[in-house]
Image (cartoon, rainbow, N blue to C red):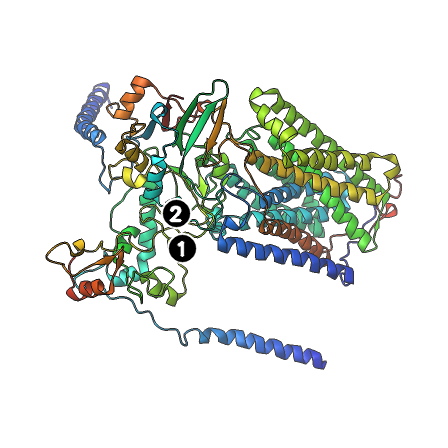
C-alpha cells in the first residue's frame, strides 16, 4: 500500500472540547469518590465481608481484560503479518495502554490501604497470581510502550515485529493470569476451573475489539476522515468471530459445571433462580452481549453499516460488564459449600445468598476509571500522530475489492 | 591420602558427629517438652498449635466462645468499635454455625473460625505476603504490609476473614486492628505466646461445657493429641486437603 | 509582544515567585514541640538523642520479629513504649493520638510526619495505672489516689510526677 500520512487531529472543535469536559467530569467524580471512600473506609460502599469485591472490580477487571484485547489489531498486523491492519496498529497499542491504566487505577484506588502501593510494588509473594499480575501489568505497559515507539519512529520500524511478538505473548500470559485470579480459587463453586484462563483470553479479544471499534469509528467520523469499507469489513468480521468464540467458551464452562452434581447449586443460581444474576446472565451476557451483536454483525443487509457495528460493539461491552458482574459478584453471592447436605445458618451469613447493593461511590470510581482511559486516548490522538489521515479503500488497498 | 588415612579420618569424623549428637540431643528433648517459651525465643516448628471442638457438647444457643473472643480481641457488639459499618460489614472472628441435616432434620452447632490450615489458600494468594503462616502453625495477617486487597477473603474456604470497613479507636493494645486491613482469628497468639490458651477455649471450659480444647498437635502427650487419637476428629471441607489445625468431632 | 502576552507572563512570574517564597513562611509561627518530661528516675530504653533519630529503625525491626517470629521481648515493643510514653491532655485524661499532647504527636505534629501506627495500634495503655502498682487507695501507702475508670485523675498525676516514684 502507499505510504500513509499520519496526522494529529485538530482538536479545536466544540465537540472535542465537550467530549474532554464530559470525560473530565467523570474522572473528577471518580477522584471525589476515591477520597470519600479512602477517608471514611469501605463502610460507605456496598461491599461487605461476604461480597468483598464489587462494582469497582467488575469494571477494573473488564478494563484490564479489554486492554489485552485492544492490542489485537496491532498483534495481527505484526505477528500474523496482515498488512491491512498496520495503519491502525499505533492506535491499538495506545488504547491497550490507556485501558490498562484505567483499570489499574480503579483497582489501586479501591484498596483498603492504597497508601501502601509501594509495599505492593516491592514485596512479592511469588505463589500469588495477584503478585504475578502486578509484574505482568507493569511489564505490559513497558513492552507496549516500546512497541509503540518502534511503530512511530521510522528508523525503528524494522524492529516493530519483534516488539509485536513480545507484546503478543506477554498479553496471553497476562490475560491467563487475570483469568487465573478466579480460576485458581478452590473456595467457591463458581471458580476453581481451568477454563477461566482461556475464557478470559477469548473474552479479551471480543471486549477489546469492541472498544477499539467504537474508538476508531468515532475518531474517524468525528474528524471527517475516511474509514474505507475494506478495513471496516475486517473489523466487523473479526468481532463476529470473537463473539462466536466467546459463546463457545461460555457454553463449555456452564456445561462442565452442570455435569457435576456438586455444582448444580451454583448453576441453578446463575441460570435459573439467582434473581439479578440470572437476568444479567441471560439478558445481559447472552442476548445483549452475544446474540444481538452477532445478528448485527453478520446480517448481510447491515454489512456496510457503521451504525450497526458501533451498536454491536456497544452491546458487546454491555454484555462484557454483565458477564464480569455475574462472574465476580455472582460467584461471591452464592454461598460456599462447607457442609454438604446441611442447611447452614449463622450470624456471619453462612448458607444464604449474600446480599450486595452497589453504592454510588463505587459506580463513580468505576466510571471514573473508564473515563480516564477514554480521556487519555482522546488526548493521545491529538498529541501523537496516531491516526492515518485517511483509511479509504483507495489509500489502503487500491486493488482490493471490499 | 592413603587408604588407611582416609579410613581413620572417616572414623574420627563419625566419632565426633556422634559425640556432638549425644551432647545436643538432651537439649532438643528438653526444649520440646517445655510448653511456654521465653519471650526472646522465636516460635518454632517443634510445636503445632491446634484446637479440637466436640460438636456433641456444643449447645445451639450458647455463644460463650464468641463473647470471650470479642472481649479479648476488641471486636464485635460489646465493644461497638465499628459504629458505621452495616451488619454485613462488621468483623466476626468467630461465629456459631447451626447445621440442620436436610435428610434427617438432625440439628447441631459448632463454632467456626480460622482453621489455621497447614496449606492455607489465603497465604498462597496474598500478593504481598502479609497473610502468613508462622512456624508453629498459626495463620496470621501481618497488618503492617496488608494492602487491603481482600483476595485472601475471596480465597478462604471457610469465610474466616473480615475486612475493617472504618476507622477504629478503642483497640486492645495486644490485638491491633485497623481500617483497610484484613483480620481473622489469631488463636489468641498473644495468649499462646505466653503459655496460655485462647479466650474461646478458656471460656468454654471455664463454663464447664468442655466442647473446645487447645494444645500442641505435635506433642503426643497433650490432651488434644490424646483425644484426637482416642475419638478421632475431622476437618471441615476435608476434600480440599488443607490439613487444618482445627478439628471437629461429631461432624 | 502583545499586551495580553506580557500580562500573562507577568502573572506567571508572580505566581512562580510566590511559590518559591512559600517555604520561608513554614517556620513562621509554628510552636516548637513541648515534650512531656520524663518522671524523675526513669529513662527510655535508649538515650533520648538516639531514640529521636532511630526510633523507627528499632520499631520496624522489632515488629518483624514479633509478628513473623513471635519474639515478644519488651525492649522496643510498641506496647511497652506506649505504657510509659503517655501524657495527660488538658482535661487530665490520657491524651489520645488526635490531640497535640499525645507524646508522639508533640514531635510529629511539628515535623509534619503522619503517624501510621495508631491506625491499628492502641495509642494509650489499656491499664493507665501500669507504671506503678498504685493499688487505688486500697493500701496504706497510697490512700489518697483514686481512678475514674482507667483515666488518671489530675490529682493522681500530680502525686505521681511530684513524688517521682520508681516503676
Instruction: Classify residue C25 by image quadrant.
Output: bottom left
Drawn side of residue B173 relative to residue A200, left or right: left
Q: Position of residue A32 (x, y in %)?
A: 58, 57
Given residues A47 and C26, the one toward you in this image is A47
Badge 1: residue crowd in 10 Å (few <14, some 14–19, many ≥20): few
A348 versus A107 height, above or below:
above
Spot the residue most to the left: C140
Q: Where residue A137 is drawn, which disc sits there?
A: none
Query: How far across and down, in percent of the image, does residue A69 sit?
Result: 68, 40
Question: How many marks are shown on the rendered structure?
Answer: 2
- Secondary structure beneath dot 1 equals loop
Q: Position of residue B80 (x, y in %)?
A: 40, 48
In the rendered structure, the answer to whether residue C73 lies left or right of residue A320 reads left
Instruction: State the quadrant of the N terminus of chain A.
Output: top right
User: Tag 2: Cα neighbours inside 10 Å, few (<14), some, or many (≥20)?
Assistant: many
Chain of the residue displaying label 1:
C
Q: Residue at x 65, y 44 (%)?
A: A67
Asked if one can make out residue A162 in the rendered structure from this viewpoint, the answer is: no
Question: What is the C-alpha distance between the residues marked 1 and 2?
Answer: 12 Å
Residue B177's disc number: 2
Q: Is residue A330 left or right of residue A74?
A: left
Residue A287 vertical placement versus A254 (above, below) = below
Residue C86 seen from this side = yes
Secondary element at tag 2: loop
x 81%, y 37%: residue: A297
Residue assigned mark 1:
C116
Amino acid at each position: 500500500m502507499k505510504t500513509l500520512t499520519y496526522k494529529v487531529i485538530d482538536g479545536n472543535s466544540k465537540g472535542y472540547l465537550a467530549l474532554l469536559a464530559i470525560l473530565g467530569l467523570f474522572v473528577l467524580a471518580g477522584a471525589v469518590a476515591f477520597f470519600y471512600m479512602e477517608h471514611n473506609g469501605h463502610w460507605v460502599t456496598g461491599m461487605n465481608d461476604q461480597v468483598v469485591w464489587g462494582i469497582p472490580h467488575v469494571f477494573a477487571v473488564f478494563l484490564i481484560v479489554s486492554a489485552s484485547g485492544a492490542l489485537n489489531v496491532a498483534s495481527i498486523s505484526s505477528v500474523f503479518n496482515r498488512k491491512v491492519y498496520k495503519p491502525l496498529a499505533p492506535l491499538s497499542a495506545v488504547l491497550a495502554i490507556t485501558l490498562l491504566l484505567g483499570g489499574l487505577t480503579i483497582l489501586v484506588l479501591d484498596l483498603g490501604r492504597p497508601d501502601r502501593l509501594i509495599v505492593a510494588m516491592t514485596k512479592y509473594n511469588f505463589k500469588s497470581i495477584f503478585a504475578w499480575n502486578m509484574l505482568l501489568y507493569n511489564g505490559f505497559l513497558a513492552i507496549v510502550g516500546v512497541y509503540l515507539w518502534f511503530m512511530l519512529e521510522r528508523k525503528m520500524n524494522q524492529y516493530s515485529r519483534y516488539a509485536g511478538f513480545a507484546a503478543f505473548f506477554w498479553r496471553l500470559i497476562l490475560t491467563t493470569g487475570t483469568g487465573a485470579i478466579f480460576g485458581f480459587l478452590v473456595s467457591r463453586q463458581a471458580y476453581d476451573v481451568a477454563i477461566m484462563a482461556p475464557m478470559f483470553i477469548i473474552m479479551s479479544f471480543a471486549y477489546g475489539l469492541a472498544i477499539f471499534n467504537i474508538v476508531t469509528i468515532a475518531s474517524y467520523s468525528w474528524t471527517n476522515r475516511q474509514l474505507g469499507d475494506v478495513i471496516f469489513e475486517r473489523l466487523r468480521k473479526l468481532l463476529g468471530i470473537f463473539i462466536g468464540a466467546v459463546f463457545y467458551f461460555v457454553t463449555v464452562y456452564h456445561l462442565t459445571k452442570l455435569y457435576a452434581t456438586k455444582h448444580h447449586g451454583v448453576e441453578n443460581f446463575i441460570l435459573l433462580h439467582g434473581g439479578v444474576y440470572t437476568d444479567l446472565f441471560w439478558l445481559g451476557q447472552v442476548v445483549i452481549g452475544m446474540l444481538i451483536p452477532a445478528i448485527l454483525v453478520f446480517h448481510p443487509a447491515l454489512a456496510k453499516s457503521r451504525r450497526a457495528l458501533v451498536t454491536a460493539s456497544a452491546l458487546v461491552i454491555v454484555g462484557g460488564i454483565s458477564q464480569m458482574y455475574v462472574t465476580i459478584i455472582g460467584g461471591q453471592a452464592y454461598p460456599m459449600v462447607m457442609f454438604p447436605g446441611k442447611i447452614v445458618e449463622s450470624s456471619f451469613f453462612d448458607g444464604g445468598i449474600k446480599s450486595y447493593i452497589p453504592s454510588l461511590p463505587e459506580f463513580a470510581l468505576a466510571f471514573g476509571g473508564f473515563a480516564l482511559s477514554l480521556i487519555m486516548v482522546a488526548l493521545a490522538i491529538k498529541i501523537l500522530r496516531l491516526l492515518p489521515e485517511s483509511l479509504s479503500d483507495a489509500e489502503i488497498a487500491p486493488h482490493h475489492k471490499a | 591420602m592413603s587408604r588407611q588415612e582416609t579410613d581413620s579420618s572417616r572414623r574420627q569424623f563419625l566419632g565426633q558427629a556422634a559425640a556432638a549428637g549425644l551432647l545436643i540431643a538432651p537439649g532438643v528433648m528438653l526444649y520440646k517438652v517445655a510448653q511456654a517459651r521465653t519471650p526472646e525465643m522465636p516460635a518454632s516448628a517443634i510445636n503445632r498449635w491446634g484446637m479440637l471442638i466436640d460438636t456433641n457438647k456444643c449447645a445451639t444457643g450458647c455463644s460463650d466462645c464468641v463473647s470471650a473472643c470479642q472481649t479479648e480481641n476488641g471486636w464485635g457488639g460489646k465493644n461497638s468499635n465499628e459504629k458505621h459499618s452495616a451488619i454485613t460489614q462488621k468483623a466476626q472472628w468467630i461465629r456459631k454455625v447451626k447445621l440442620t441435616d436436610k435428610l434427617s432434620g438432625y440439628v447441631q452447632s459448632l463454632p467456626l473460625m480460622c482453621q489455621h490450615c497447614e496449606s492455607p489458600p489465603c497465604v498462597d494468594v496474598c500478593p504481598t505476603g502479609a497473610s502468613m503462616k508462622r512456624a508453629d502453625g498459626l495463620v496470621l495477617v501481618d497488618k503492617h504490609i496488608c494492602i487491603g486487597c481482600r483476595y485472601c477473603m475471596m480465597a478462604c474456604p471457610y469465610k474466616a476473614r473480615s475486612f475493617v470497613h472504618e476507622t477504629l479507636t478503642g483497640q486492645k493494645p495486644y490485638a491491633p486492628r485497623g481500617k483497610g486491613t484484613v483480620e481473622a482469628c489469631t488463636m489468641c497468639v498473644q495468649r499462646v505466646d505466653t503459655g496460655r490458651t485462647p479466650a474461646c477455649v478458656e471460656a468454654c471450659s471455664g463454663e464447664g461445657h468442655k466442647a473446645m480444647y487447645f494444645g500442641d498437635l505435635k506433642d503426643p502427650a497433650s490432651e488434644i493429641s490424646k483425644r484426637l487419637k482416642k475419638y478421632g476428629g475431622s476437618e471441615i471441607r476435608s476434600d480440599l486437603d488443607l490439613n487444618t489445625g482445627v478439628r471437629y468431632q461429631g461432624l | 509582544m502583545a499586551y495580553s502576552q506580557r500580562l500573562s507572563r507577568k502573572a506567571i512570574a508572580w505566581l512562580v515567585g510566590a511559590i518559591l517564597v512559600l517555604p520561608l513562611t513554614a517556620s513562621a509561627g509554628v510552636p516548637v514541640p513541648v515534650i512531656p518530661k520524663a518522671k524523675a528516675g526513669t529513662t527510655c530504653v535508649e538515650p533520648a538523642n538516639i531514640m529521636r533519630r532511630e526510633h523507627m529503625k528499632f520499631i520496624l525491626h522489632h515488629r518483624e520479629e514479633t509478628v513473623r517470629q513471635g519474639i515478644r521481648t519488651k525492649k522496643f515493643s510498641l506496647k511497652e513504649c506506649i505504657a510509659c510514653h503517655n501524657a495527660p491532655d488538658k482535661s487530665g485524661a490520657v491524651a489520645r493520638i488526635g490531640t497535640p499532647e499525645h507524646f508522639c504527636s508533640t514531635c510529629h505534629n511539628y515535623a509534619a510526619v503522619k503517624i501510621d501506627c495508631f491506625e491499628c495500634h492502641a495509642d494509650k495503655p489499656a491499664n493507665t495505672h501500669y507504671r506503678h502498682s498504685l493499688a487505688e487507695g486500697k493500701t496504706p501507702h497510697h490512700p489518697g489516689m483514686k481512678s475514674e475508670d482507667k483515666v488518671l485523675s489530675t490529682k493522681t498525676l500530680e502525686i505521681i510526677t511530684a513524688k517521682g516514684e520508681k516503676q
